[in-house]
Amino acid sequence: MKQLHSIFSLKDLGEMSYFLGIEVVRDHDAEIHLSQTKYVTNLLHKVGMPNAKPMPTPMTSGLKLLAHGGEPFSKSALYRSLVGGLQYATITRPDIFYAVNKVSQLMHCPLETHWKAVKRILRYLAGTVHHGLRFQKSKDCRLYGFCDSDWGSDVDDRKSTSGFCVYLGPNLVSWSSQKQPVVFKSSTKAEYRSLAAGLTEII
């Protein structure tokens, strides 16, 4: 800090507690908890759902969202704005990454069914506003990777979705949920594609 201050004009604000919507809580220097409680609360207020009934999961199991064939959602600008806000919330909420990825693929022409899926994510967040990422000290510096694929899950183009997460010891440091670029005829090929994406991230 002294070396930097000798060249640049700096002001020491002390330990970080809030930055770009991310709240930082330290526990005796042994753990750091990152959350976006205020940001998520503001999102809920934006759509008039501050007291929404909480849901146990961000998306129902086996939900298939069609790009066409339903009633168009009248407030497409609100849909895009809210989904963009949910994308930012995934910085500390990997638990909603898959669901947000799905509704993000439908921003060009949102339907009423898509809006219901977004509201489901918001209702899940309403019950988990204090959730976030926890980083703790550990002597384990090994990298652990987990991956999976949802074979042919997109009913419109039959492309699969890859997902992976990477841990440094007990701490989650990287994660992804992304549609695969090509259609695979077998679940094995889709799984290998997901494995390759996770391994590339680790390397």
Image: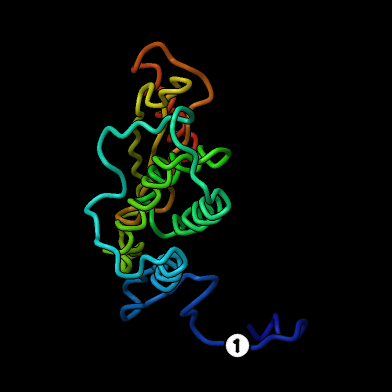
Colour scheme shown:
rainbow
Residue 80 horizontal/vertical position (percent): 55, 50
Residue in the foreground of this view, choosing between 28 and 161: 161
Q: Residue at x 70, y 80 (%)?
A: 4
Q: Residue at x 45, y 70 (%)?
A: 42
User: Does 60 sit above or below residue 46?
Assistant: above
Residue 104 horizontal/vertical position (percent): 50, 43
- Residue 202: quadrant of the picture: top left
User: Does 12 sit above or below residue 187?
Assistant: below
User: Does 11 sit above or below residue 38?
Assistant: below
Q: Residue at x 42, y 53 (%)?
A: 173
Residue type, label 1: Asp
Q: Which residue is mark 1?
A: 12
Taking the view exactly as shown, the residue that stands out farthest to the left is 56
User: Does 31 sit above or below residue 28?
Assistant: above
Q: Residue at x 27, y 32 (%)?
A: 62
Residue 8 horizontal/vertical position (percent): 76, 82
The kind of secondary structure element at disc 1 is: loop
Q: How many marks?
A: 1
Disc 1 packing (10 Å; few <14; some 14–19; many ≥20): few
Residue 127 horizontal/vertical position (percent): 26, 63
Quarter occupied by the N terminus: bottom right
Residue in the foreground of this view, choosing between 134 and 53: 53
Taking the view exactly as shown, the residue that stands out farthest to the right is 7
